[in-house]
Amino acid sequence: MNAETRIDPGAPFAIEMRNITKVFPGIVANDNITLQLRRGEIHALLGENGAGKSTLMSVLFGLYKPEKGEIYKDGKKVEIRDPNDANALGIGMVHQHFKLVDVFSVLDNIILGVEPNTAGFLKRKEAREKVLRLSEAYGLNIDPDALIENITVGMQQRTEILKMLYRDNEILIFDEPTAVLTPQEIDELMAIMRNLAAEGKSILFITHKLAEIMAVADRCTVLRKGKYIGTVDIASTTKEELSNMMVGRDVKFVVDKAPAVPGKTVLKVEGLTVKSRTRKKTAVKDVSFSVRAGEIVCVAGIEGNGQTELIYGITGLEKPVSGKVILRDEDISGKTIRYRNMHGLSHIPEDRHKHGLVLDFSLEENIVLQRYFEPRFSKKGFIRFDAVREYAEGIIEEYDVRSGQGAISSARGMSGGNQQKAIIGRELDRDHDLLVAVQPTRGLDVGAIENIHRQIVASRDAGKAVLLVSLELDEVMNLSDRILVMYEGEIVGELDPKKTTVQELGLYMSGAKRDNVMEGGSENAKEC
C-alpha cells in the first residue's frame, strides 16, 4: 500500500500541535511550533541535537506542559496533562532510552500498568495470548518469558513497540528508534513501521539519519534551535536539501582524509580472552591485533559478536580470562581504569549513561570527571571551581554542546546527542596516545557527525592511534584505514577499506567468509 492510498489529505489531522512553546531555565526549547500529522502517515521530525524534537514529543505525550499552544486530535481540542491522558487518547511513545524494568520479563513489561485482572487476580494467560497475537500480526517476534536484562537492544525495542500496540495506541511516537540498533535490526524496524502505517496507525519518527527518512517517511518537519523551519514531502526532496534545512549550511557526507602514515605500535593485544557478562560463554576468543600511531583501525561486526567485551577487556571494564593488553610497550592488563586513563588511553564508551557520565552531576563536573585531581583543577585537596568552569566552557564551545544552563546544567536533563558531544570533547581533549571510540557518532546529527569525524582524523594525523568500533557501515568504510571483522568472538578478516566493498564486508560480518591467515589480509579469504 503506497502513501496515496493510505493517507486522506482531506481528513482532519490525526494530531495537530498548534503554536507550541516550551521554556526551560535558560532556553526556549520549542518556540511557537506547529506540527500536523495525518492519519496513516509516517511523519519524520528532523533537527540538530538539542533542536527541540524530543521536547515537542514529550509535550504530546504529556511529560511536559507547554507554556503556550494547543493540541488537537482528529480535529477536536484535547488536554494532555500526563502520559495516562496520552494513552487514553491512543498516543504511545517509544523513548530514546527505553523505559523497561530489567528484572521483569518481556510480558510483564508489556502489560505493566494495564494488567488484565478479575477480583485482583492477574489474568496472565489472557495477556500472554494477546501479546503473542500482536507479535505475530506485526512481525515483532519476541520471547514473552525472557528477562529484559538478558535480551538484545533490538528485542527491547520490540517490547516497547508491543507496549504501545497492547494499549491499542493509534498515534505512535518513535524517539531516535534506530540509534542503538544494528543495520539488520534497522531494516526490520523500517518494515514494521510500514506495516503499522498500512494498518492505519499514524507515526511520528524522530531521527538524525537522512537515509532512513528518505526510505520510510511520507513527510518531514525540520526544527532548528527550537524553531520551525518547514515541512516537506519526501518524494520531492533530497538528503542534501534536508541536511541544509537542519543545520543551515551544506554538509559533506564523505570524510576528507589523507592516506595514513602509520608509525610505532601503540596498542598490542595478545591472545585476549574475555567471558560474557550476560551469557555463559566466552565472548572474546584468543584475539590478537595491533594498532599503530597515525592510523584508524575499525572493529566491525554485527552487534553481539564480542566487540563490547573486547573493548571492556582493553579499557579495564572487564578482567580478561587470559591474554595481554600492551600500551606503549607496557603491559596494562592488571592496571586500574584510572591508571590506563592517566597513561594515554581515552575511551568514548558504548553506553554513555552507564560508563560515560554521572547523570546527576553537572556538565562541568562530568567534563573533568577523570581529571579533577590534577593540579590544574585542584589545590591542597580542594577543587578549583573557577578553573573547572573555564575549562568546561572551552569544551562546550569547541564541540557545540547545547544545554539550558551551560556548564552548570544537569547531565541528565541534556539531550542524548549533546551528552555524547560532551563525552567526545572530554576524551579527545585529554592527552592521549590511544583513542578507543565505540559508536562515537551514535545519536548525533549530520553536522555533528561531520565535526566528530574531522576531529578523529585530526587525532590520527597528530600521531595518535585510534581504535574505532562502529555498527554504521558508511562510517566503517569512510573513516577507517584498516578494518578488523569480528564474528562469534574471533577476528575473521582484516580488510583494506580502499580495496573492499560493503558487500564483501557483510559476508565477513555474517560469518560466510573468513581469512585463512590473518596476517595475509583479505587476499587469503575463503568461503565458509
Image: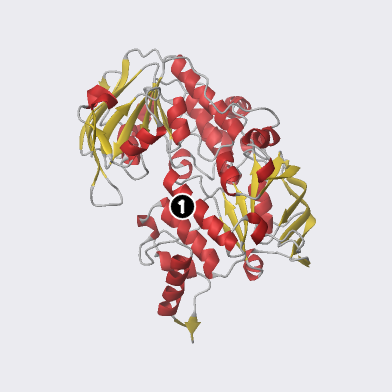
The part of the image, by quadrant, that contains residue 127 is bottom left
Above or below, 41 against 329 in this view is below
| Amino acid type assigned to the residue bearing label 1 in the image | Glu
Residue 208 location, x and y as percent? 58, 41
Badge 1, how many Cα within 10 Å: few under 14, some, many 20+? some
Count of numbered tags: 1
Q: Picture quarter containing residue 508?
A: top left
- Is the residue 164 above or below the residue 451 in the image? below
* Above or below, 266 relative to 40: above
Q: Residue at x 66, y 44 (%)?
A: 235
x and y percentages locating residue 223 in the rendered image: 70, 42
SS label for mark 1: helix
Q: Which residue is drawn at 51% across and 44% down?
A: 179
Q: In which quarter of the image is the N terminus?
A: bottom right
Image check: 445 left or right of 504?
right
On the picture, is 39 further left or further right than 20?
left
- Name the spot of residue 439 as percent of width and height, x first: 45, 36
> Residue tagged by mark 1?
188
Res. 220 visible in picture: yes
* Residue 377 shows up from this direction: no
Residue at x 78% of width, y 67% of height: 76
In the image: residue 341, left or right of residue 319: right
Measured as percent of width and height from the top left, residue 379 is found at 51, 24
Question: Is residue 429 or residue 470 the one in the foreground?
Answer: 470
Q: Residue at x 20, y 27 (%)?
A: 517
The residue nearer to you, when weighing 383 against 512, is: 512
Its colouring scheme is secondary structure
For this orientation, the residue located farthest to the bottom is 119
